[in-house]
Image (cartoon, coloured by chain):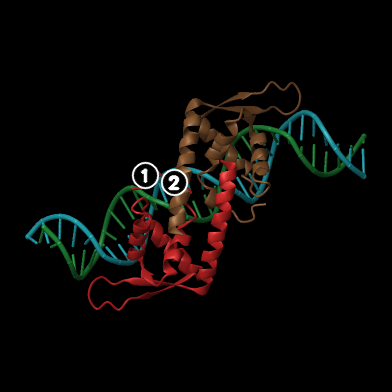
Chain colours: A red, B brown, C cyan, D green
Amino acid sequence: MNGKISSDLLRGHTDTIVLGILQYGDSYGYEIYKKIIEKSDGLYELKEATLYSSYRRLEQEGNINSYWGDETQGGRRKYYTITSSGEQVYHQNKLDWEFTKKIIDRLL
Amino acid sequence: MNGKISSDLLRGHTDTIVLGILQYGDSYGYEIYKKIIEKSDGLYELKEATLYSSYRRLEQEGNINSYWGDETQGGRRKYYTITSSGEQVYHQNKLDWEFTKKIIDRLL
DNA sequence: AATATTACCTTGACAGTCATAGTAATATGA
DNA sequence: TCATATTACTATGACTGTCAAGGTAATATT
């Protein structure tokens, strides 16, 4: 795990990655954490602490909302929903990423 | 300038960018600063303070060496040379970047 | 009965970036 | 000539995202 990717190279993408997952439907903290590992074929892990601070940030900025699941048994789950402003941010961030890629390629 | 690229998206690339420039020959601090703006067609500027901390880091790690130019007139210039370990780091970082790009593309 | 997994969360340290500020020389333009 | 811009270097302190470390508590597995 984390073979080659230093966290600095991923910095700034965490929120976008989370929003990208929530675009396909509500999810809860731990599940998002697992999905990121899965989506990267186990090549990258975003640490839980990093994600929880991302959730906090995204919620404060109005890009996601949260609600508690109605699990009558088992651990309670806090679900997150993407808001419409979150969707806009997501698409803008993807554009920014395409742009950034080109600049870095030119600079390296 | 800096239209779309947040510094977080570039974080971690500064040293590699500097090494990339020094690969083509010695250069001095201010010139490297200018070359980065030029290479990105004015779309990105790495701040001087950021670069000088990169130079310090790279020199401490043995990836570059420095010497004062022999300008008899005009501002003194501190030139930097890439070392062989710096060249290795540069190539490795480029590989890491190619890898990182793929992971991010998959995650976004 | 013991351990692993799920699921949440907090705190404090670390490191790269940058705003701000400063020094000092040369070049340019009114 | 005088003022301003540019070249060229550097230091300091704040900000922010990431993560190591630690914690709680329930369920599932061996």
Q: Determine if marks 1 and 2 fall on one subunit.
A: no
Q: Residue at x 68, y 42 (%)?
A: B38
Query: Tag 2: residue type?
Result: Phe
Q: Is A9 left or right of A33, judged from the image as shown?
A: right
Asked if disc 1 and disc 2 are in contact, CB closer than 8 Å, the reply is yes
Cα distance in 3D space between marks 1 and 2:
10 Å
Of all chains, the one bearing label 1 is A
Binning the other alpha carbons within 10 Å of mark 1 as few (below 14), some (14 to 19) or many (20 upward) gives few
Residue designated by label 2: B99
Question: Which residue is at 55% across, 55% downward?
Answer: A98
Of tags 1 and 2, the one toward the viewer is 2
Q: In this orientation, does residue B99 appear?
A: yes
Count of picture labels: 2
Task: Please provide percent x and percent y for residue C17.
Answer: 56, 47
What residue is shown with label 1?
Answer: A3
**Which corner quadrant of the image does residue A67 belong to?**
bottom left
Q: Is residue A67 above or below residue B36?
A: below
